[in-house]
Image: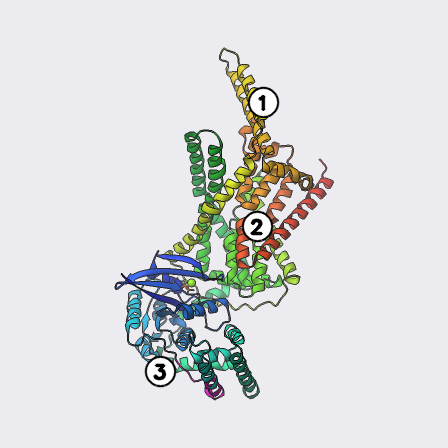
Amino acid sequence: MTKTLNIALAGNPNAGKTTMFNALTGARQSVGNYPGVTVEKREGYLQADGYRLNIVDLPGTYSLTAYSQEELVARDYLVNERPQLVIDIVDANSLERNLYLAVQFMELGVPLVLALNMMDEVRKSGKKIDTARLSQLLGTPVVETVARSGEGKHQLIESALERIHGDDSRWKPLEISYGPDIDPVLQEMTDLIRGAEFLTDSYPPRWLALKYLEGDVQIRSMGARAGDIGEALERMARRVTEHCKVTLDTIPEAIIADYRYGYIASVTKQGVLVQRGHQERIIFTDKIDRILTHRFIGPLLMVGVLYGMFMVTFTFGTVPMEWLEAFFAWLADVVTRLTPPGLLQSMLVDGVIAGVGGVLGFVPLIMVMFLGIAFLEDSGYMARMAYMMDRVLRIFGLHGCSVMPFIVAGGIPGGCAVPGVMGARTLRSPKEKLATLLTAPFMPCGAKVPVFLLLGGAFFKGSAATVLFWITIGSWMTALVVAWVLRNTIIRGEATPFVMELPPYRLPTLKGLCIHTWERAWQYAKKAGTVILAISIIIWSFMTFPSLPEATLQDFARQRTAVQSALPAKPDPAAAAAAGRELLRIDGLEAEAALKHSFAGRLGSALESVTLLAGFDWRTNIALLGGFAAKEVIVSTLGTAYAMSDVGEASQGSLSNRLRQDPAWSRLTALSVIIFVMLYAPCFVTVVAMARESSWGWALFSMTYTTLMAFGLSIAVYQVGQYIFPS
Ligand code: GDP
Ligand code: MG
């Protein structure tokens, strides 16, 4: 049996962890969540030397104090799961800053191997690092790597295995001196903790004492639950804090950070940083940034980039989309021919293939878009967009980091609110996160777009792109205004400063782009295979049952027989064509009667008394109700509902023709429906995602307020419109 070893990859954000993770594990990886929190957990494995190495990509952090969820998750993982080793990915371009985290791992005592990553850039910049010396001074293996090309990855694994099997594979905490103000009380607290055995199973005593002085929320609340010991520690921490305030006008936390940096400086100055280099890349990045984040040119360029991405998505995404549509049409055809007419056929063709096909049809579009987003992210530009948008979003109570969730949700039309809502995880402040995920679903997601294209094409002149453009602007404005209202009423609270680090510009790797794109597209496709499949069948059955009573069916059958028997015995093409049309008309009438008789039809009709205020008839109601299950359903349900009630010639036409010819529809109706679809409740899957990211209370709140707002606005537009343009 092969032995399993657990290794965690850790490091500052943008140090190259994920790239190294991909290089090490290739496709052998899976993405999940850390229990109870919404931080992504990426796991993979590789075989080496007869061992199975399980690798976990920890969230990127700058420290191990519980300042953020990422830091907590990383630390809890280390303490609770006790991996055999941590590989700390260090961006060697800024060695000192990155070593800050390394020192904290050493203080925790976990066996460590340092990967000095980005060595290609370091070499190019002329900087020289004496790796052997660094290793000697820190007492930790150090390996030079270039994660992008995989350079050094074998050596990294070798060093890791060596370290695990070496003499000192136990956890051994490093003890740094924190100076005359901190050290004595630190010692006192350490003794106290050791004596009381407070959490000493999991953490080194001195480390716990340090966390008290750093004001660590998690450790302190554990102390509060432990009773006396917690109180004693609190008292001591308070004493030092006061002492530092009086004598040095600072807080212990700052002193601790200073000493840690001092420790690092003492290491790097002892012949580690042989040559400082001329920092070419930083200068290059600064030069580009002078233009790309310029006060006026920057935002203009950003709009250009977004528009370009939008164009690329639609240009390259629609072609394979048509192939997929053709494929599903073919599949429906085959299934129709292979199965006997009846319920099963209807369920497979109208329910399963139409529903799931409708969703999968968007996969190519989504892949192209995610590829673009992955490029913006990996190149470092996305961070600049967040930085520039922060100035605007701040006005509305949002944060620069809200821009990503908005864009992913459809800020550039074609996204999906589900990953958008999940993307709100990057926001640190719970209130800004909540405001973001409550408003991101206003964006025109890929499933709403077909509705806009259909109605825009049928009722409004001008190109589809123009219609979509204005809808997009409207959606953004709504999202921002609603966010502002929410942040000034029920989610009031401080704005947090924008502290996201702007990483240097880099050309993304193809491998990284592919993995990012694939992960997201797969998440989306999985949704089609599971949730949408179930929903499609449910909707189909609501539109099918109960079926028409026997007497009515027989009545339609009699009408058909009458038409057929009225045909003259002699072949007459004109008469046959007329009879064919008549038969189609009867089919249509029957289908309409059946739909109206079904649960969905009854519900739609029952709602009419209210919804007619906004101009929605019973068929539109069915489509909009279906759209709550998944917005993809709106167009397909409209298609079914209107295909069913068609008369004669018009049945040859497209859905948009049919709508135009239907007396129940007008420009005003179309506008009212567009507004409603823009704003009403997010689809079911999004609501579930929202509940997971916040709570069911907020998710239900979101459903209610959006629908009420949408309906109110639709009624207003429809009523005012009718008053101004009476037909
Ligand atoms: P993470 O935030 O630590 O997961 O960092 P990523 O793995 O996402 O890497 C951040 C960026 O650095 C990406 O654009 C990578 O392509 C790039 N990168 C990673 N490793 C290297 C390296 O060794 N050399 C260079 N030049 N770029 C790298
Ligand atoms: Mg990463």
User: As drawn, which residue projects farthest toward the top?
Assistant: 570
Secondary structure at numbered mark 3 = loop
Q: Position of residue 200 (x, y in %)?
A: 43, 77
- Residue named by callout 1: 555
- Which quadrant of the render holds ligand 1? bottom left
- Amino acid identity at mark 1: Asp
Q: Is residue 347 visible?
A: yes
First in residue order: circle 3 vs circle 1: 3
Q: Which mark is residue 270?
A: 3
- In the figure, 608 relative to 107: above or below? above
- Residue named by callout 2: 682
Q: From the viewer's perspective, tell me whether residue 157 is left or right of residue 496.
A: left
What residue lies at 51% left-to-right and 82% top-to-bottom?
252
**Which residues fall within the magenta stretch?**
174-187
First in residue order: circle 1 vs circle 2: 1
Q: Quadrant of the N terminus?
A: bottom left
Viewer-nearest of discs 2 and 3: 2
- Tag 2 near tag 3, CB within 8 Å: no
Residue 312 on the magenta segment: no
- Amino acid identity at mark 3: Gln
Tag count: 3
User: As drawn, which residue projects farthest toward the left?
Assistant: 49
Secondary structure at numbered mark 2 = loop
Query: Looking at the image, which is closer to me, 126 or 274?
Result: 274
In the rendered view, how is the structure colored?
Answer: rainbow
Viewer-nearest of discs 3 and 1: 1
